[in-house]
Image (tube, rainbow, N blue to C red):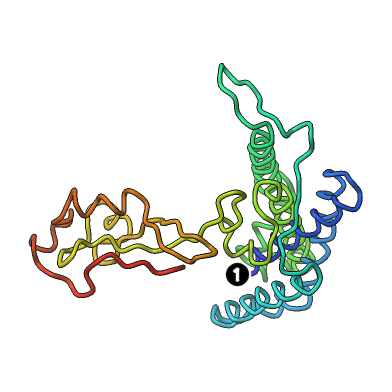
């Protein structure tokens, strides 16, 4: 099953956590409410829509879940507006913690701990419980699992609800670090507080030359080099990172051996394309 709308559940969870936290004044109440509400939403979504897509081809799954992204963005915009919402971390976790002589934000340590804890619990659940055995069996051979008396439809609904709750947990935990805004599930780095930026694809070919060096190897020898660049959201300008600026001058002939040095390629030059 291809589900492109998981980021929408992440966004909905962040908005619910922000709204409940502002209303109740409790960050934990906001997280718990967001997880429960998003789990119910995920179960409803699985029963009404996704269950009908399991037997369809990948194209139908992509189109349906992409439509969910558009619908979720507009619904969130209608309910909470287009402006980002503020979600603050608890005051007790707002400062740094001293670790071996250096300071690290306490809230980020909490994020690391929660991530490790969730990963460990999921591993134990899937690998060492009867429920996990049913999930693995249903994913491998649904017909045989149903013949053994397991309600696979209910099981898959429960699994999707748990996944939706974890999406809400991620959105709520990252809300204090990122701007809670429409579309944050599709572009999670677009809401970095104090440094909003766009991600760009940058072709670092020097004029008339082949793709340059290791970034080209990362993207594939015959594809354009992919580097990150920062640009002003307000002005929409493209400002390549120093590596994108300097590499064509340091390696004017590039780093690939499949083309002889000096052989021109079409479309040479520094090109930025917004993702």
Task: Look at 73% across and 65% down and name the residue there.
Answer: 156
Figure quadrant of residue 217: bottom left
The correct choice, above or below, for 114 with respect to 36 in the image is above
Foreground of the two, 102 or 258: 102
Image position, residue 202 (x, y; %): 35, 62
Foreground of the two, 140 or 160: 160
Image position, residue 103 (x, y; %): 59, 24
Q: Residue furthest top?
A: 101
- Neighbours of disc 1 within 10 Å: few (<14), some (14-19), many (20+): some
The correct choice, above or below, for 261 with respect to 55 in the image is above
Figure quadrant of residue 254: bottom left
* Number of marks present in the image shown: 1
Q: Pointer 1: what residue?
A: 4
Foreground of the two, 17 or 59: 17
Horizontal arrangement in the rendering, residue 14 relative to residue 109 (left or right) = right
Q: Residue furthest front?
A: 235
Task: Look at 57% across and 62% down and name the residue there.
Answer: 187
The correct choice, above or below, for 266 with respect to 29 in the image is below
Task: Look at 86% across and 51% down and name the residue there.
Answer: 22
Foreground of the two, 37 or 196: 196
Figure quadrant of residue 7: bottom right
Horizontal arrangement in the rendering, residue 141 relative to residue 262 (left or right) = right
Q: Residue furthest right?
A: 24
């Amino acid at each position: 099953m291809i589900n492109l709308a998981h980021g929408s559940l992440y966004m909905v969870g962040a908005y619910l956590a922000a709204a409940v936290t502002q209303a109740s004044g409790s960050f934990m109440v906001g997280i718990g409410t967001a997880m429960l509400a998003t789990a119910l939403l995920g179960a409803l979504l699985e029963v009404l829509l996704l269950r009908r897509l399991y037997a369809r081809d990948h194209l139908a799954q992509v189109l349906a879940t992409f439509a969910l992204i558009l619908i979720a963005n507009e619904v969130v915009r209608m309910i909470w507006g287009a402006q980002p919402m503020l979600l603050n971390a608890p005051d007790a976790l707002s400062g740094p913690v001293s670790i071996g002589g250096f300071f690290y934000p306490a809230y980020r340590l909490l994020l690391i701990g929660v991530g490790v804890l969730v990963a460990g619990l999921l591993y134990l659940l899937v690998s060492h419980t009867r429920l996990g055995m049913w999930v693995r069996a249903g994913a491998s051979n649904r017909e045989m699992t149903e013949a053994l008396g397991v309600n696979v439809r209910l099981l898959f609904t429960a699994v999707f609800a748990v996944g939706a709750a974890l999406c809400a947990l991620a959105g709520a935990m990252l809300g204090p670090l990122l701007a809670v805004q429409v579309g944050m599930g599709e572009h999670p780095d677009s809401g970095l507080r104090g440094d909003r930026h766009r991600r760009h694809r940058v072709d670092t070919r020097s004029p008339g030359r082949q793709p340059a060096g290791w970034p080209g190897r990362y993207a594939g020898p015959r594809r354009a080099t992919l580097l990150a660049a920062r640009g002003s959201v307000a002005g929409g300008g493209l400002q390549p990172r120093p590596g994108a600026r300097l590499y064509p001058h340091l390696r004017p002939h590039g780093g690939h051996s499949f083309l002889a040095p000096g052989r021109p390629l079409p479309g040479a030059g520094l090109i930025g394309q917004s993702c």
